[in-house]
Image (cartoon, grey):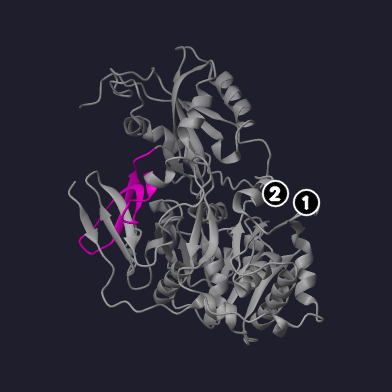
Amino acid sequence: MAEQSTGPVPGLTTPPDVVSTIALTRCQDTAHRIWFREEDGMRSLSLAELDRGAARVACRLHAAGVRARDRIGIMSRNRIEWVLLDLAAVKLGAVVAGVEPGRYEPEQVIADFGLTLLFTENEPERGAVRDIGGIRGWAQDEGTDPAALPGREAYDPADVFAIKQTSGSTGVPKGIEATVASVNRSMAAVQEMFHHGDGDNLLVFLPTRFLQQRYWIYSALVNGHDVTLADRITVFEVAQAVHPTVIMGVPGFYEQVKARVEAAGAPADPAARRAAVQAELGGAVRYLWTGSAPAGRTVLDFFNDCGVPLYEGYGLNETCIVAKNHPGAVRVGSVGKVLPHKRIRFDKDGILIVGGLDPVNTHYTWCGPGANEKVYLPTGEVKTFDIGHVDEDGFLYIDGRVDDIVTLSSALNILVPAVEERLREIPEIHDCAVFGDGKPYLTAVVSPAAPDTDPESLADAVSRLNEQLRYEQRIYAVVVAGERFSVDNGLLNAQFKLVRAEIGRVFGEDLDLVYQKHAVYNDGSTDGAPVLVTAAVGRPRTQKAEE
């Protein structure tokens, strides 16, 4: 494929310095609030109260030795203390590293990122490890005068603002130092598309350790609207209580909403379906936002066809938002038009390359050997390893990936060869191919070790393996092929490697039936036993695929 490219729109101005505004300006907004749920119900603070509390926390952090450019870590679920700490760090010019709770040893996180302090929950205080539960008391301490916070200069655009960490499910976790300029540029682009303001309430329930989720809190402080903090377990309850106008979610969440509406008897009439969807989400939604993983067309149509806009977009940790559907520029099935400050091109292999003004960064700070060279080009551009195209009207489409990473609808990435290797250890399995891109869970097409393989025995073996895997790696259904994968039937290539696309095509109907029958929303919120593995019988294929 010949190289194609689109570039930033000429004449772009410098975006508003949102970061310095939050750092240096005292918020006086008493009309808008941040809402959050606690054990005894919903609570809220005015944005002025939130800002004042964050300044008090900043004073206490300063007294503990935290200075500009120092790094503090937060390893906790979503809670108001997370927000207070993050905003306090902004006021000090410190750098926040959001870390997935329960996955890493605190001392290792401190060493890896060079942290001054690490705030955790359910951990005893020791050394640099602090209990995040004490932050509320710091914020409410009227003996701490926010005005006593030492003065400082505005951020430089090149300053490091936050540390972004990848999940590590595709290899060694990688850390990226996101610049102030990238945050300001991305937030300006989002605001230009969606015009968040008075009357809006943005519901944030994805983990605040992801930097983009914190954008909506920063937006509230500078653009004047409400914001609500929740999590995946409480999201529906919170939505009913606060009536959000905007919800940010991954495709798996909207699959869950769709399933809830259908379980109650989804009406065919679009207006009635719209009312049913709105009832699930609090009744005031003006639009829904999705990204991070591919959204299926049936899910997109379910919402868009009934007048509840679900806008899909595209981005990576390494690039932030690249493209987004938005009011006035929508093409369902695409991920929208490329943002004005981004530049994309396709290399000779059709792989999407992303660059542009104010990149997140031009390298990983923490990564395994070879990761920087694989992803970041000498030009500073990011090689996405996604295949796509741009239509005649400028809408970007993501057609698939060139590697073996599957992205679930919950936005979790899984390196499937590692899972396949474990499956091949099961005596009943000769070979296998794992699927699930854009789906709520993984499935496997299995080449049996013997023609008379017992499906129930195989299912039991896979269930036992699941107990040893992380929840996103678990196989929730198995399709048993009627014959072994081979070069002759086109399911292996001449090097006896899986022809994954052909396996997916041959067994596509079987896989579709599995997902229709078992519409599980696997959000990993519990550690219970996995869904019973269901074995189906795939259609045999005896003719080799055409070259």
Residue that label 2 marks? 106
Instruction: Decide if residue 223 is on the left or right side of residue 36.
Output: left
- The percent coordinates of residue 285 (x first, y second) are 52, 71
- Could you give the CA–CA distance between mark 2 and mark 1, rounded to whole angstroms? 9 Å
Which amino acid does the dot numbered 1 rest on? Glu
* 298 over 304 or under it: above or below: above
User: Residue 208, can we see it?
Assistant: no
Horizontal arrangement in the rendering, residue 183 relative to residue 118 (left or right): left
Q: How many marks?
A: 2
Q: Which residues are magenta?
A: 374-403
Vertical arrangement, residue 11 with respect to residue 163, above or below: below
What element does badge 2 sit on? helix
Asked if marks 2 and 1 touch (Cβ < 8 Å), the reply is yes
Q: Position of residue 39 (x, y in %)?
A: 78, 63
Residue found 62% across the figure and 56% down from its top: 232
Q: Quadrant of residue 33?
A: bottom right
Query: In which quadrant is the C terminus drawn?
Result: top left
Task: Please name whichever residue, 31 or 257, is drawn nearer the observer in this view of the structure.
Answer: 31
Q: Secondary structure at mark 1?
A: loop
Residue 530 horizontal/vertical position (percent): 62, 36
**Residue 404, percent from left and from top:** 40, 37
For image coordinates 63% across by 87% down, the residue present is 28
Magenta-colored stretch includes residue 387: yes
Query: What residue does disc 1 label?
Result: 123
